Image (cartoon, grey):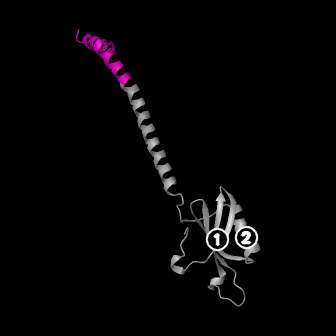
Amino acid sequence: MSLLEPEEEQSNDTTFDPASKIRLFETQQREDESGSSYLKKFILVAVVAIMVVAGAIYFMQPGIGSAVKPPKEVEDSVYEYMRSKEHRSVHEITFYNCDGWYWVKILAESHSTESVDDPSNQYRLRVDRNGDAVTNIQTLPRPEKENDLPCK
């Protein structure tokens, strides 16, 4: 009979007692909860990542007084203004972002008798804008060297 006893024990192992059935459902419930837990964590990480990227983009925007690259239409308007109104061609040009307008620092091509640093070769313009369109361009008086700051 000793040979049969292990078989009986073996058959008893394959049957479920009421306590094992309860544990099976608990395991399945824990598995379902872990899936939703991972989803909640993923959504939280995604929201934080989106906020970080949005913050970085916001803080990288040019501020007032920052040198910027204007739209092509604005740049073309300034070149045309210098050629038609001031009768000079542009050597160097820098645009600065101001509140609703651009402050433009221009170094014009020198005439044969003037040096490049001659004050007559330097211009300051105010370019009023409406979106990408230029509404008004005016030549500003050239300020003293210590007051030659954008947006003033």
The answer to whether 123 is drawn above or below residue 27 in the figure is below
Of all residues shown, which one is farthest toward the right? 84
Q: Which residue is mark 1?
A: 125
Query: Residue at horizontal 31%, vertical 19%?
Result: 23
Provide residue 101's location: percent of width, then percent of height. 61, 62
Of all residues shown, which one is farthest toward the left? 2
The kind of residue on which mark 2 rests is Tyr
Label 1 CA crowd tier, 10 Å (few <14, some 14–19, many 20+): many
Q: CA distance from mark 2 to mark 1?
A: 10 Å
The answer to whether residue 6 is left or right of residue 92 is: left
Query: Residue at horizontal 54%, vertical 80%?
Result: 145
Provide residue 11's location: percent of width, then percent of height. 31, 12
Q: Which residues are magenta?
A: 1-29
Local SS, label 2: helix
Disc assigned to residue 81: 2
The kind of residue on which mark 1 rests is Leu
**26 within the magenta span:** yes
Label 2 CA crowd tier, 10 Å (few <14, some 14–19, many 20+): some
Local SS, label 1: strand
Provide residue 47's location: percent of width, then percent of height. 46, 41
Do we see residue 72 in this rendering? Answer: no
Provide residue 128's location: percent of width, then percent of height. 65, 62
The answer to whether residue 86 is left or right of residue 100 is: right
The answer to whether 101 is drawn above or below residue 148 in the figure is above
- Contact between marks 2 and 1 (CB within 8 A): the answer is yes
